[in-house]
Every structure is written in C-alpha cells, then in structure tokens.
C-alpha cells in the first residue's frame, strides 16, 4: 500500500453517512434590485456603509468577465461613486413608482440602465435580464408609441379607436371568460398580498434574513445577494497525475480547466451572460469553504479518476482526454488577483496572478474513495 493512503482513508472515514451530501444547491446569482436588496447590503457588510465594496467586487464576484478586469482598475473615487449609485438605485429609486407618470418612467429607465451595467460588468447569469422585464411596465402607451407603426389600420390606430370608444362609455359586454379571468386575478392578488405579510415584516426587521421562504408554496420569498463582499478571491484547482506515487517530488500534476471560472492565469475571463455554468458557480462557493462542507467536490474527483464522460463534459480541458485516467486527483487552494495593466504579469499575457495557499483536499485514488462512496450510497465510478 502506498504510504499515506492509509492516512487518507482514515481522514475520509471520519465523515460518517450522516454527513451525506445532497444535490448541490446554488444560491441564485445576484441581480435583484429594490429596497429588499438595498437593506440587505446596508445592514450587512461594513464596506457597503463606508463605500469600499466596489474596490473588491469586480475581482471577487463569482465569474468575472473581461470588462470586470478593467473596471477593477478604476480610481478609488469611481468605486465610491459606484457604491453610492447602487444605494440610490436600490433604496430610493423604487419609490419613484408612486410619484406620478414621469417619475415612474424615470424609475423604469434607471432600473433598466442599472441592469445593463450589471450585465456588462459580470457574468451574473440570466436574472439581470429577467429583472428588466417588470421594469417595462413603467412605460405607458405614449412613451412606447414611437416603436409601433402609426398608419391607418396600424396598432396605434387600433388603440386610438379603443380609447375613443372607452371615452364614449361604449364598452363591450362582459363575457364569461373575462369574468373568470378577473376573478382569478383578484384571488391571486389577495393571495400574494397575504403571503407578502411575513416578507414585509422581515424587510422591516433589524435582523432581516435573506434568501428565505416563509411558506411551502414559495410564491413570495425574501431574496438578497452580496450582503457581504469577499475581500480576496480564492480558487480550488483540481489536478491529476498519472504517477504511481503521488508523494514523489517528480510527480507531474496537470490542471483541469473549467469552462468559465479562473484557472490558467493566462486565460482571458469568459463572457457567457445570460448563460450560466452551474458547476463553476459551485466551485466559487467551495473555494471559501472546505471540502467537508462540499462533499460533492469529492464525488467530482472520483468521477474524474474514472474519466467519467458526464463529468468531463462539464470542463473546458481534461488533461487526460484520449489517455488513461489519472491515478490520483487532488485539490489545490490558490489566491487569485487581477494582474495590473502594464505590469510584469500583464506583459506576459496573464490576466491573473495566483499564489498557492495550500492543499484543499489530499491526493486521492479510486481505491481511497471506495468506502467513502459506499457510505454515502453514491454509485462507484467505473473506468471509462
């Protein structure tokens, strides 16, 4: 038996089946805007109150894009302005809806502009796009009229005729289907209002909770993201080796590359919004926790040890493609920072500068994981 294998087995045997990992659940990407989101921030990390959160956000967000690299290099006063603007847009602008037509239109325009800026500055999935949809309700027919043809028989002409008929009091008789639809709308409005009571109470509470459901229907929930900002970026880098002895100094460890998350310092940050790579987001959360909190990452390592086709399809680069699978897989913990434009690393074509922190989990073989997988009732990986 390889020296150290027994030790690794002992470490993993301490995790009993009661620690069984469920399917990983990814908190939703940050995108919502409004008083709920703004209060989560103001009551959360101190950096939202001293206006320094944007000093870190672009570098430490889940999946940065190329624009985030350049925005991170902005002067300090730009970051202060960004933070203040965020507070204004999330804590003040939402109330414009109640201040008349023009302010409501301004609200819609500002919120859509805010979401466009978020889309440009990071890969925050599809929620920014969805957040723009309700903002469209802020624009009435007069505001959007220029988008539609105005000739005879056109949409504008039809709407004008309907408005003239309504002004004369000529309304079509109510049909059965229309009455049913109105009744459903009223019932749904009452239901949403009733379910919103605990959400509003939570909103006003000094111990506000985020990302919580208050009823099994999950129709009305509380949501908030970036209440705390991570101040440094860490990454878990998965590596494999074909060496029979993982402890030998001459063992060659090769990196697995994910589709979007930072890995190779020389690889340009990706641009995928509104698409969403779920595994890359999970790796972001795992990096500031431990593998004991994320047992799924050990499950992934086992799959990579077998060159499992489904697992490697989630990666951008499998160094053991068209080769025998690795004998060992390990997780290494690194600290990442954007390179400085014009600096030594940027001149060498590197977007990132990384420094090893230490091991994230020790070198593992399929044999090491046999009892671990069985105790969790996971299918044991078969070599491809």
Image (spheres, grey):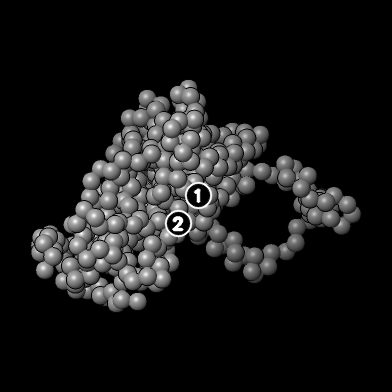
Residue 162 sits in quarter = bottom right
Q: Is residue 62 left or right of residue 206?
A: right
- Seen at 24% across and 55% down, the residue is 250
> On the rendered image, what quadrant is the N terminus found in?
bottom left
- Seen at 33% across and 47% down, the residue is 235
Regarding mark 1 in the picture, which secondary structure is present there?
A: loop
- Seen at 40% across and 63% down, the residue is 318
Q: Disc 1 vs disc 2: Cβ atoms closer than 8 Å?
A: yes
How many numbered badges does the structure rendering display?
2
Regarding mark 2 in the picture, which secondary structure is present there?
A: loop
Q: Please state the horizontal and vertical placement of residue 3, each as a whole percent of the image.
A: 11, 62
- Mark 2 crowd level (few <14, some 14–19, many ≥20, 10 Å Cα): some
Q: Please state the horizontal and vertical placement of residue 160, each as a whole percent of the image.
A: 81, 50
- Seen at 41% across and 26% down, the residue is 51
- Mark 1 crowd level (few <14, some 14–19, many ≥20, 10 Å Cα): some
Residue 258 versus residue 75: which sits nearer the camera?
258
Q: Please state the horizontal and vertical placement of residue 320, each as a whole percent of the image.
A: 37, 66
Q: Is residue 215 left or right of residue 67?
A: left
Q: Earlier in the sequence, mark 1 or mark 2?
A: 2
Residue 259 - label: 2
Q: Is residue 272 visible?
A: yes
Q: Where is mark 1, residue-wise?
A: 270
Q: Is residue 241 left or right of residue 369?
A: right
Residue 244 versus residue 282: which sits nearer the camera?
244
Q: Please state the horizontal and vertical placement of residue 107, each as a whole percent of the image.
A: 59, 37
Residue 61 - label: none
Q: Say if 314 sits above or below 28 in the image.
A: below
Residue 223 versus residue 62: which sits nearer the camera?
62
CA gap, disc 1 to disc 2?
A: 8 Å
């Amino acid at each position: 038996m390889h020296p150290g294998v027994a030790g690794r087995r002992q470490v993993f045997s301490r995790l009993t089946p009661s620690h069984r990992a469920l399917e990983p659940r990814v908190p939703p990407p940050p995108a919502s805007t409004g008083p709920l989101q703004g209060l989560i921030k103001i009551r959360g990390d101190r950096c939202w109150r001293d206006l320094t959160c944007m000093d870190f956000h672009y570098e430490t967000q889940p999946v940065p894009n190329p624009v985030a690299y350049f925005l991170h290099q902005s002067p300090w006063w730009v970051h202060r302005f960004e933070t203040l603007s965020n507070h204004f847009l999330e804590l003040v602008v939402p109330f414009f809806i109640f201040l008349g037509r023009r302010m409501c239109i301004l609200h819609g325009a500002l919120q859509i502009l805010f979401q466009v800026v978020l889309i440009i500055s990071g890969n925050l999935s599809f929620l920014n796009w969805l957040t723009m949809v309700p903002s469209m309700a802020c624009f009435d027919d007069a505001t959007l009229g220029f988008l539609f043809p105005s000739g005879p028989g056109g949409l504008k002409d039809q709407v004008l005729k309907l408005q003239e008929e309504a002004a004369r009091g000529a309304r079509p008789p109510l049909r059965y289907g229309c009455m049913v639809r109105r009744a459903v709308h009223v019932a749904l409005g009452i239901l949403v209002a009733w379910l919103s009571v605990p959400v509003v109470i939570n909103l006003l509470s000094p111990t506000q909770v985020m990302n919580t459901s208050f009823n099994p229907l999950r129709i009305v929930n509380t949501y908030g993201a970036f209440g705390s900002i991570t101040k440094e970026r860490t990454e878990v880098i998965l590596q494999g080796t074909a060496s029979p002895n993982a402890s030998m100094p001459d063992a060659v460890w090769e990196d697995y590359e994910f589709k979007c998350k930072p890995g190779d310092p020389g690889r340009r940050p990706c641009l995928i919004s509104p698409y969403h790579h779920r595994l890359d987001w999970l790796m972001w959360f795992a990096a500031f926790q431990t593998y004991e909190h994320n047992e799924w990452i050990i499950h992934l390592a086992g799959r990579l040890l077998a060159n499992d086709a489904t697992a490697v399809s989630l990666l951008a680069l499998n160094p053991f493609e068209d080769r025998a699978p690795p004998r060992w897989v390990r997780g290494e913990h690194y600290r990442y920072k954007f390179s400085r434009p014009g600096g030594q690393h940027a001149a060498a074509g590197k977007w990132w500068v990384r420094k090893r922190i230490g091991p994230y989990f020790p070198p593992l073989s399929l044999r090491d994981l046999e009892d671990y997988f069985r105790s969790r009732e996971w299918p044991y990986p078969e070599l491809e």
